[in-house]
Amino acid sequence: MKLFTVGPVEMFERTLKLKSEQLPYFRTDEFSKMMLKADGQLKYIVDASENSKTIYLTASGTGAMEATVMNCFNQQDKLLVINGGGFGERFEKICKIHRIEYTAIEVPLEKDLTEEMLLPYENCGYTGLLVNVHETSIGKLYDIAMLGKFCKRNNIFLVVDAISSLFIDAISMKEHCIDALIFSSQKALSLSPGMAGVVLSEQIIVERVLTNEVRSMYFDFKDYIVNFERGQTPFTPCVGTFIEYSDMIQVICDAGIAKIVEDKKRLANQFREELKKQGFGVPQYTMSNGLTPVYLDNAYEFYLKLKENYNLVVTPNGGALRDKVIRIGHMGNLDSCDYCYLLECMLKIRQE
Ligand SMILES: *Cc1c(COP(=O)(O)O)cnc(C)c1O
């Protein structure tokens, strides 16, 4: 079985080996040191400013999305939410539940987000902007540089859910003026699920996180900040996933994030070219290096055939896109041979 999904994804041998080992006790110097080292490497990879801090949660990515909104904003805020699909909708839902005022900017399905779409919201007193930089439900990548500039000139906090984008698309906290950058373990990091993190800028920590009253015990970032001074978390973390994380971050540092992103971009582009040559439809909008949607008649049936006849698992869709699109992931331990074989199988199914 091979996974062309967006999380969990096809894992690397070294991670599978780590997964098979006995977990250590974690309130130790060794564990603390491991986490502090990994965190330093993460901040280098995401180009975080010097006094930024990372919150490590044991939660899925959505937990980190919700916790970030709860810790960074309150009922005095007025937010913008970029909504171009299922994950944008999730940010809207979080705002509603926590009674935070927001305006949704809806991005039409076939279009990229443009400066023009942001124009009506300049100088309107907004205090934060929430975006899923890669809207995974449709594989669309937004222009983070444009959003960064918009937030900077409007003095707005920029919160980026980069869960399906970090470590596979280029992103820089400093260059793109990002105040909160959310990631999780089971996407491009190719690890077990369970760990989600948020890197916070010094400004959002000082002006928001340290003073905001959070009506939650488990998700109050203040405790996490104090504990992580010594490389610990307030509560028991998913110890195994943290160990996998420290190993993978080292691998990424050794290879260089720019090279990893470049390689994935090449892999995704090659596959897209081959698809087009064979007459498969792919979107016109800007895509993440992490995912290629393919337009198909009877898409869900196509997904089932790939799985049942060839042991290849791509990502199906729910809702309105169920029978129109399958999504093919480029995260994890996959190389160009895997895509050649996948395409071969897709052609066979189409000819049936
Ligand atoms: C996967 C994903 C999430 C998190 O989903 P969980 O199931 O909670 O891990 C959040 N945002 C985006 C854009 C994602 O792709």
Image (tube, helix red, strand yellow):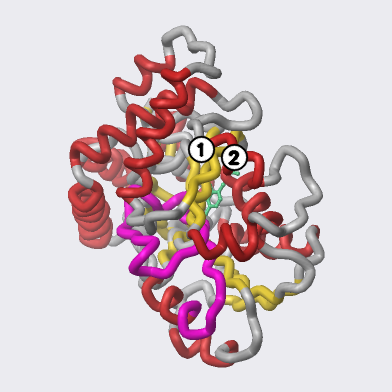
Give the crowd class for mark 2: few <14, some 14-19, many >=20 residues within 10 Å.
Answer: few
Is 281 within the magenta? no
Q: Residue at x 64, y 89 (%)?
A: 124
Quote the CA–CA distance across marks 2 and 1.
6 Å
* Front-lying residue, 294 or 51: 51
Magenta-colored segment: predominant secondary structure: loop
Q: Write down the residue under mark 1.
A: 229
Q: Is residue 223 visible?
A: yes
Q: Secondary structure at mark 1?
A: loop
Instruction: State the mark number for residue 337.
Output: none
Where residue 185 appears, as percent x and y from the top left, is: 47, 37
Q: Which residues are magenta?
A: 151-180
Q: Residue at x 38, y 55 (%)?
A: 50
Q: Is residue 68 above or below residue 186?
A: below
Is 169 within the magenta? yes
Residue 120 appears in which quarter of the rendering?
Answer: bottom right
Q: Is residue 332 above or below residue 163?
A: above
Q: Residue at x 60, y 33 (%)?
A: 58
Residue 95 appears in which quarter of the rendering?
Answer: bottom right
Q: Is residue 310 visible?
A: no
Pointer 2 with pointer 1, Cβ within 8 A: yes
Amino acid type of the residue that numbered disc 1 sits on in the rendered structure:
Glu
Where residue 258 appears, as percent x and y from the top left, is: 21, 52
Q: Residue at x 79, y 69 (%)?
A: 75
Q: Is residue 340 above or below residue 1?
A: below
Q: Write down the residue under mark 2.
A: 226
Where residue 35 appears, as percent x and y from the top left, is: 43, 30
